[in-house]
Image (cartoon, rainbow, N blue to C red):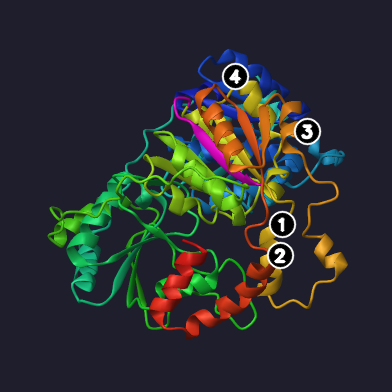
């Protein structure tokens, strides 16, 4: 075997079954080796950000890494944003980056770059350049072990061309994954004592704590002890729907998150971090936990969240408590002129069983959580790292991970253009994905942020940077050009008909929803003043306003 062939067998033996690739000349021996390993599926992506985002979506659903193949430092740079999202989501990804042959680097050729420095932005825990064919497979095993542990991480293995083509490669068997341990007994007892103190307490759930076993244990504790259940703002993967415990997500807008946290005296973290605002704003706190609230940790991301919560429930005598579960409930089908809330309502009305919902709708998805809360059980994937352009690639990965489950991706028009090439991969792989694009011809969230940061009155040049008119994008035509069945809808009736068709027929499909901005005109002008007033309003009034704006 050459190095690439031995590496391919090592990956397959470790359970890595998919490689999302955007290769170049340096990776040709790896590409040729794909045919030597029948257990490896190769998925071509036409942009590196699609490959990295697809690996992220795949791993979120499979709880194990896929491989990504990128071309040199420039290819890694193109894929960096979605590797950032994977890092923030603690998602396991094996990131293989081809490099020039070790004998060639001294000449500083046109594509020569410092790959390790670039990779450390998204792989702080593991970056290694394999130096010899003999060492390659052990390097790969070390990368796999690093990626798939808790917390998951992006592990970057840099593969020089001559290490790949060199003869004498030896596959290396991977060790079995080490099972994560729960919180120790002393921590469990200490947290139990805090909850029994009678202070107003919330459990903040993130990561693996938002899967069914952990959610049920947390719901037993909530029912028995009266604690509140909260979820991180942008969960990596959250299981929700009828029959599961309802959990309120921390709001994106810091002022609204402040309303959610204002009365708490204790916040207990379970595979989560204390809430902070996405950005800094003049005169506002970045750390959102009230000064009067103490923060404690039950389980770190390195620990088994479900087992920790189950042990806490036992320590509190809550294991037999009757948990509060979400009742089945669907909204009626919407009618009339199409708006973003009506799209969310239609998704709630027609959501199929066991769906995977990917939410990168930005401002257009404000009502999605409310409209799907009582629908059939589903998994929700969100924009964990905040780097837009994740949704379409994530849908590719999720659909490959779970081919028997329908994938519905709700995407804003601005973010869709970052990784629009994902549509081609969906068509090529014949994936069961329904993409919904909210075409409101605006970077709507940035119009809101322009007011929130206290910037001066926006003139025509500033406004032009946040507007997508002239020309207005036609996503149906873009999708058709990449082999995806696509239609446009301007009425609620047309949208429902299109969604029913898409869910009944093999995918992929795209529905372009022609909608006005959700936050525009008087709403946008009033929002900054309303947000400023929230801390000064009576708490019941502030909470009611929060639920009205962003349920």
Density class for disc 4 (Cα within 10 Å; few <14, some 14-19, many ≥20) is many
Mark seen at residue 5: 4
Q: Mark 3 = which residue?
A: 103
Left or right? Give the position of 327 relative to 390. Answer: left
Q: Which label lies toward us, 2 or 3?
A: 2
Q: Which label lies toward us, 3 or 4?
A: 4
Residue 179 location, x and y as percent?
Answer: 32, 42
Q: Earlier in the sequence, mark 2 or mark 3?
A: 3
Residue under the point 26% across and 50% down: 216
Density class for disc 1 (Cα within 10 Å; few <14, some 14-19, many ≥20) is some
- The outermost residue toward the front is 336
**Measured Cα–Cα span from mark 2 to mark 3:** 51 Å
Contact between labelled residues 2 and 1, with CB atoms less than 8 Å apart: yes
Density class for disc 3 (Cα within 10 Å; few <14, some 14-19, many ≥20) is few
The part of the chain drawn in magenta is 403-412
Q: Earlier in the sequence, mark 1 or mark 3?
A: 3
Q: Mark 1 = which residue?
A: 443
**Measured Cα–Cα span from mark 3 to mark 4:** 21 Å
Mark seen at residue 447: 2
């Amino acid at each position: 075997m050459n190095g690439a062939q031995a590496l391919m067998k090592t990956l397959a033996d470790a359970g890595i079954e998919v490689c999302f690739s955007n290769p170049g000349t340096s990776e040709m021996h790896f590409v040729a080796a794909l045919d030597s390993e029948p257990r490896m599926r190769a998925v071509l992506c036409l942009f590196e950000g699609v490959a990295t985002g697809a690996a992220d979506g795949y791993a979120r659903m499979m709880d194990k890494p896929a491989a990504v193949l990128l071309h040199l430092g420039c290819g890694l740079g193109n894929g960096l944003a979605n590797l950032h999202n994977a890092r923030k989501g603690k998602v396991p990804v094996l990131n293989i980056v081809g490099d020039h042959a070790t004998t060639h680097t001294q000449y500083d050729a046109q594509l020569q770059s410092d790959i390790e420095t670039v990779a450390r932005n998204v792989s702080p825990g593991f970056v290694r350049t394999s130096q010899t064919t003999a060492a390659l497979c052990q390097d790969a095993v070390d990368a796999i072990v690093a990626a798939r542990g808790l917390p998951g991480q992006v592990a970057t293995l840099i593969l020089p061309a001559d290490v790949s083509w060199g003869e004498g490669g030896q596959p290396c068997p991977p060790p079995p994954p080490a099972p994560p341990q729960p919180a120790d007994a002393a921590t469990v007892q200490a947290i139990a004592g805090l909850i029994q103190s009678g202070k107003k307490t919330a459990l903040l759930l993130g990561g693996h704590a938002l899967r069914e076993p952990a959610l049920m244990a947390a719901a037993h504790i909530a029912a028995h002890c009266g604690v509140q259940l909260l979820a991180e703002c942008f969960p990596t993967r959250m299981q929700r729907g009828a029959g599961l415990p309802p959990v309120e997500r921390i709001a994106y807008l810091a002022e609204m998150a402040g309303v959610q946290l204002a009365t708490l005296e204790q916040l207990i973290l379970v595979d989560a971090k204390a809430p902070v605002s996405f950005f800094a704003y003049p005169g506002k706190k970045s750390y959102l936990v009230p000064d009067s609230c103490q923060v404690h940790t039950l389980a770190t991301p390195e620990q088994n969240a479900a087992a920790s919560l189950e042990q806490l429930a036992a320590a509190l005598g809550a294991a037999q408590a009757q948990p509060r579960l979400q009742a089945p409930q669907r909204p009626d089908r919407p009618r009339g002129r199409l708006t973003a809330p009506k799209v969310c309502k239609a998704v709630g009305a027609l959501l199929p069983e066991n769906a995977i919902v990917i939410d990168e709708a930005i401002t257009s998805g404000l009502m999605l959580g409310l409209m799907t809360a009582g629908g059939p059980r589903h998994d929700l994937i969100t924009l964990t790292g905040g780097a837009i352009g994740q949704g379409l690639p994530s849908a590719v990965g999720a659909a490959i991970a779970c081919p028997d489950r329908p994938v519905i991706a709700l995407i804003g028009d601005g973010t869709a253009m970052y990784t629009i090439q994902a549509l081609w991969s969906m068509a090529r792989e014949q994936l069961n994905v329904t993409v919904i694009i909210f075409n409101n011809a605006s970077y709507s969230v940035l119009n809101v942020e322009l007011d929130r940061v206290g910037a001066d009155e926006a003139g025509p040049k500033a406004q032009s940077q946040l507007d997508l008119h002239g020309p207005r994008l036609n996503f149906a035509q873009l999708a058709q050009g990449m082999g995806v069945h696509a239609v446009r809808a301007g009425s609620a009736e047309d949208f429902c008909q299109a969604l029913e068709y898409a869910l009944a027929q093999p995918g992929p499909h795209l529905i372009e929803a022609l909608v006005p901005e959700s936050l525009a005109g008087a709403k946008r002008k009033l929002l900054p003043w309303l947000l400023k007033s929230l801390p000064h309003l009576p708490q019941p009034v502030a909470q009611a306003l929060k639920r009205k704006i962003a349920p």
